[in-house]
Amino acid sequence: MIIGGIQWMTLLDYPGCVAATLFTAGCNFRCPFCHNSELVLPDLVTTIGVKLEADVFDELSERRGFLDAIVISGGEPTLQPDLLPVLSRIKSLGYLVKLDTNGSRPDVIQDILEKGLADYIAMDIKAPVYKYQQIAGVSVNTDRIQQSVSLIQRSAIQYEFRTTAAPGLSEGDLLRIGDWIAGSDAYWLQTFRAPSEKRLVDETCRESDALKKNDLEAVWNQLRDRFDGGGVRG
């Protein structure tokens, strides 16, 4: 597994748990608004990506009792050819595992679920189907996105879907997504942030208009009855 960074303690990435987050390097999307460009753009990935070494597992072993869970984020983790063995090794240490994914590889998600290698999955829903290519920055097979949604909805583990209110998404787009995934356990609407210290995949997004928190709260008021949990973040 090629990683681009480790956050050794977070209270935000796994609800209710003290967790560490491993950020995998490499992604098959090019979302213009993404502020993790160092994990996405090939020239930057080549510069910062390093192979996951045994000493990381040694550190994880030592932190048992302080950490409850490990989050595998990205980039897009399902692109990593050794993802399942890594998840298995983390589970063998007694940790809960959360996977963050864009849902583009339902075959990998299915394997993870069948083998019991994740306790929580968070999947990004980038846009309604008709606008997926624009928001993801590449051609996307939305049938595969739908397969992932269905697999996760049918799973017995904790999960959430989430959408960042990126430039180019309207309130109507978010309502369409809500119609699409209605009945899911949790759906989160997230405000778009463009941190000054981070490079965006497309820097022009920094000056682009995006929905504000009050806009998202208005959308959520129309959607809340369709989900068991969720809300607005950021």
Image: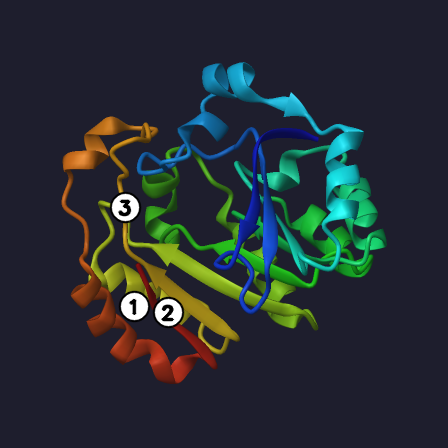
- Residue 112 to residue 158: above or below: above
Which residue is under mark 2?
Answer: 178
Which residue is under mark 3?
Answer: 193
Q: Which amino acid lies under the numbered mark 1 shown in the image of this protein?
A: Leu
How many circles with numbers are drawn on the protein? 3
Indicate the quadrant containing the C terminus: top left, top right, bottom left or bottom right. Answer: bottom left
| Residue 155 x %, y % | 68, 69
Question: Can residue 173 be seen from the camera position used here?
Answer: yes
> At numbered mark 1, what does the secondary structure look like: helix, strand or loop?
helix
Indicate which disc, 3 or 1, sits on the residue closer to the N terminus: 1
| Residue 41 x %, y % | 45, 23
Indicate which disc, 2 or 3, sits on the residue closer to the N terminus: 2
Which residue is under mark 1?
Answer: 175
Most foreground residue, 167 or 131: 167
| Residue 35 x %, y % | 36, 36
Indicate the quadrant containing the N terminus: top left, top right, bottom left or bottom right. Answer: top right
Most foreground residue, 24 or 161: 24
Q: Is residue 35 left or right of residue 101?
A: left
Circle 1 packing at 10 Å, graded few (<14), some (14-19), many (20+), is some
> At numbered mark 2, what does the secondary structure look like: helix, strand or loop?
helix
Q: Which amino acid lies under the numbered mark 3 shown in the image of this protein?
A: Arg
Q: Which amino acid lies under the numbered mark 2 shown in the image of this protein?
A: Gly
- Residue 47 to residue 192: above or below: above
- Callout 1–callout 2 Cβ contact below 8 Å: yes
- Residue located 34% across and 50% down the image: 130
- Residue 30 to residue 43: above or below: below
Residue 213 lies in what quarter of the image?
bottom left
